[in-house]
Image (cartoon, rainbow, N blue to C red):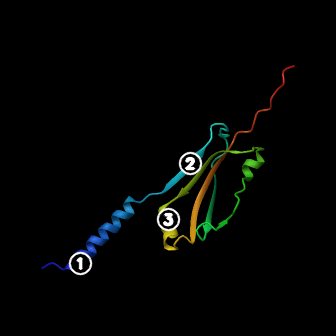
Amino acid sequence: MRCPKFHNITIAAILIAMVFCASSCYSYRVATHALPSTGVTPLNKVRTYSLFWGLLNKPQMIHTPVCDSLGVNGVAEVLVKNNFGNALLTVCTLGIYCPLTLEWKCAAPCQPQTDPL
């Protein structure tokens, strides 16, 4: 005789394992072809979060000291990444705490224009 309680636990465990195996991270990529990346600087990365469904963002502004030191006025590519752990944390806190990873590449500095006379 089969134990229905054991059968239900087995099915639940299999379903939970399938959910974890099917989960993955996701990312958004914003790129511009008007400002190509420098190619010499790696991706800059910062972990950030928002609180209370985006009402309080910390930090509210991301500074780019590497791009600033190159004398660049923009970024060529921005990646916003999330993974299963961050999504689970957001769900468990009902959206009160939402962590993200931001990555960006600096744009290439503009070439000085020569004025032919």
Q: Which mark is residue 22?
A: none
Left or right, 64 with respect to 48, comes to right
Mark pair 1, 2: CA separation: 45 Å
* Pointer 1 with pointer 2, Cβ within 8 A: no
The mark lying in front, picked from 1 and 2, is 2
- Residue drawn at x 59%, y 46% is 30
Asked if 1 appears above or below 73 in the picture, the reply is below
Residue hosting label 2: 29
Residue hosting label 1: 6
Q: Secondary structure at mark 3?
A: helix
Asked if 70 appears above or below 102 in the picture, the reply is above
Asked if 102 appears above or below 10 in the picture, the reply is above
Residue hosting label 3: 87
Quadrant, the N terminus: bottom left
Which quarter of the figure has residue 60?
bottom right
Q: Residues within 10 Å of mark 1 (few under 14, many from 20)?
A: few
Dot 1 amino acid type: Phe
